[in-house]
Amino acid sequence: STIHQKDQQSTDTQLTDYRIISQRKRPISSIIYIMRWLRPFHLSVLVFAVGASEVCFAFSSLERRSSITYRYTHSAAAATSSSDPSGGSSTKVLVLGGSGFLGSAVCTTLSDLGIPYVSTSTSGRDDSTPLDLTQEADVELKVADVIAKNGCNAVISTVGSINTPDDEVINAASGKAAIAARMGGATRFVFIGNAPRVRELSKSLPFLKGYAAGKEEAEAKIRDAFGPSDYCIIQPTFIYGGEDFGINPPRVESSVGQAAEEFLGLYPLQAVAEALPGILGVALSPPVSRERVASAAVNAALGLNGDMVTLEGPDIVAVASRRPSKSMLMKGDGSAVFDSDEAAWEKRQDLKRRLFALGPEGQEEAVVIMEELEDLRPSSVRPIEDPTLNGRWDFVFDVEPDIGTGIIRTLLEEPPPILGPIFNLNDVRMEIENSRTIRIVVATSVLGQDCDLVLTTSLLPDESDVAGTTVLERFEGIELGGNKLPVPDSWKRCRPLEISFLDEDMLIARGNGGEPHFLMRDK
């Protein structure tokens, strides 16, 4: 007990020092968090609240995924199988179409996570097993044989084509593969389909009818072959990625696709897209990156899609970034790293001391330490039900700054003299009440008058989460200077929020893209 008290005093001292160091960092991190919710209000509110620089940020950097964020998104998929308490995965995956545009990304994700897999392709390139699902009469037996011989218990099919003479046959082939997978002993099947609106549009275009019919046939056979909890059909609108543009098949390189995803993901544009018919509505639907679709497919193969058997739009992002909880780090032989709760407690305190000592600039090392802390969260702690969650929290650490956040940092640390008499940012904080309501308060003054910006969200339980770490955060409204601003109901949307670590000093939260937010309690 005495040792714990001394260690806690040391931690409290370092926490206080770190809070002093991070005073200028907190507003930046909290603004990043807020901006991810305030997309509908950039033009009408934020120009007035935080200056014209926010408009540049809104269109250049919203939800931009740094390399650190992608690493978190991928590590989030390091699933724990119910039959494997070590935190590793007992799953082995068969990837059909593993050398293609999307299949290669699936294989890369599996490889990064250390999950064993077998890849097949028509050509047999990239060390894949040659297998043509459309030409061989006994293809079902061959697929079943590959599964049985290699001990695969999950299948991800990325087989597909668009605007070719054989579209219907190629896109329907995954249905035969699903029947074969069940024969071979596979217990899960994941298929890359297409969004319902894309399919309806395709049926009306002569050159895409075969594409739509093939996808539809494959999905019907998958549903027949596997029970509701054993398959997942991912239904993106348009998948972008890579470094090249193409017309047939259509390809958009990553940077352009990312910009389109961010812009078309603005709530007003989403509402417009949902209201428009046919090709206009499809054209305004946000695309999704192949890395995210690949992560969603892998997580679905590991059973992390919960009870969602079809994934569209935000659901793809949510499943791609879902993080399973680990009750304890394990050694290679399956035994616990720590022999007692006290040893685990001491390790957490040591990690916190290292984290606090880094200061706000040591982001690369901070990411590693934060991940260790998340893995050391005791299984008995259910953050979303813990009263410790309530109170005031200060933002400290977020993802690497991009162009937009770089502009904000400059304005906060070295504001232009001309802004001084006009606008001041006084304080930024997050307040959680009753474990159900979050208020982000941006205390500002404009022309010497207080003009606080308050964003309110509600926390709804995620029934599919058994670890007690995930909630659905629902946007409720915004106030400016004490006045509620009108918000259409169509903009009151939900996103997953994971409280991946919580104790008396700090919490780590992750949004639907896997981006980390490190917050400290204001005592």
Image (tube, rainbow, N blue to C red):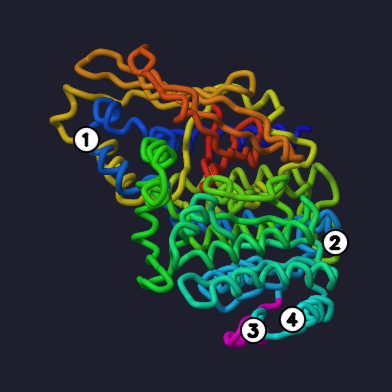
Q: Where is residue 7 in the image (x, y as percent from the top left)?
A: 67, 38
Q: Distance between the residues labelled 2 and 4?
A: 39 Å
What secondary structure is marked by label 4? helix
Q: Give residue 383's mark.
A: none
Q: Which-is-in-front pick, marks 3 and 2?
A: 3
Q: Residue under label 3, please give it.
A: 128
CB under 8 Å between callouts 2 and 1? no
Q: Give residue 139's mark.
A: 4
Does 323 sit left or right of 80 as displayed?
left
Q: Distance between the residues labelled 1 and 3?
A: 52 Å
Q: Give the range drawn in magenta.
A: 118-130
For mark 2, does the 10 Å Cα neighbourhood hold few (<14), some (14 to 19), or many (20 or more) residues?
A: few
If you read the primary sequence from the N terminus, does the residue marked by circle 3 or circle 2 appear first?
Answer: 3
What secondary structure is marked by label 3? loop
User: What amino acid is at disc 4?
Assistant: Val
Q: Distance between the residues labelled 4 and 1?
A: 61 Å
CB under 8 Å between callouts 1 and 3? no
Look at the image and say whether residue 11 sits in the magenta stretch.
no
